[in-house]
Amino acid sequence: LFHKADEDNQADPSSIFIRGAAVARRLLAEDTPSYVLHGDLHHENIRHHPERGWLAIDPKGLYGDRAYDAANALCNPGTLPEIDPEPRQAVETSDDHADALDITRERLLSYVFAHACLS
């Protein structure tokens, strides 16, 4: 993301990647607790096992702000047609995730924006 933003800064100063990189830099500079993260948490990497319950599979094993895992999951519902793509649903889902993580919706959506630019 940072490399793309640097390239775009020369060619297209209005690039969304420049804004995404600025948001990512701000988030990475903040002093927040770090946790072990899944690193690729999304709907297709969560499975239900009849005996073991819900499992997160295919972890990448990152360490950082737990809002990142939630942002990754929120960026990915388009692959599942049964998930409602309406903005109202996105706001409700963001609020649910933010509440569960005890962070603000704005912080979570900042991670969503930065992650979407990275992807």
Image (tube, rainbow, N blue to C red):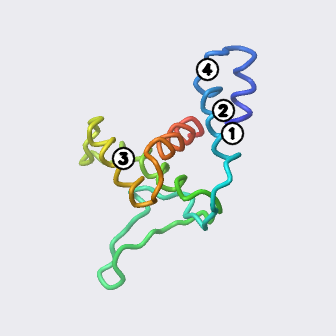
Amino acid at dot 2: Ala
Q: Nearer the viewer, mark 2 or mark 3?
A: 2
Tell me if label 1 and label 2 are in contact, CB under 8 Å. yes
Circle 3 residue: 77
Amino acid at dot 4: Ser
Whichever of labels 4 and 2 marks the residue nearer the N terminus, that label is: 4
Instruction: Indicate the secondary structure of the residue bearing disc 4.
Output: loop
Where 92 sits versus 41, above or below?
Answer: above
Instruction: Indicate the secondary structure of the residue bearing disc 3.
Output: helix
Residue 30 point in image, percent of width and height: 67, 48
Q: Nearer the viewer, mark 4 or mark 3?
A: 4
Task: Pick whichever, 46 or 29, lies toward us.
Answer: 29
Tell me if label 1 and label 4 are in contact, CB under 8 Å. no
Looking at the image, residue 79 sits to the left or right of residue 5; the answer is left
Task: Pick whichever, 67 or 83, lies toward us.
Answer: 67
Where 16 sits versus 2, above or below?
Answer: above
Circle 1 residue: 25
Circle 2 residue: 22
Quadrant, the C terminus:
top right
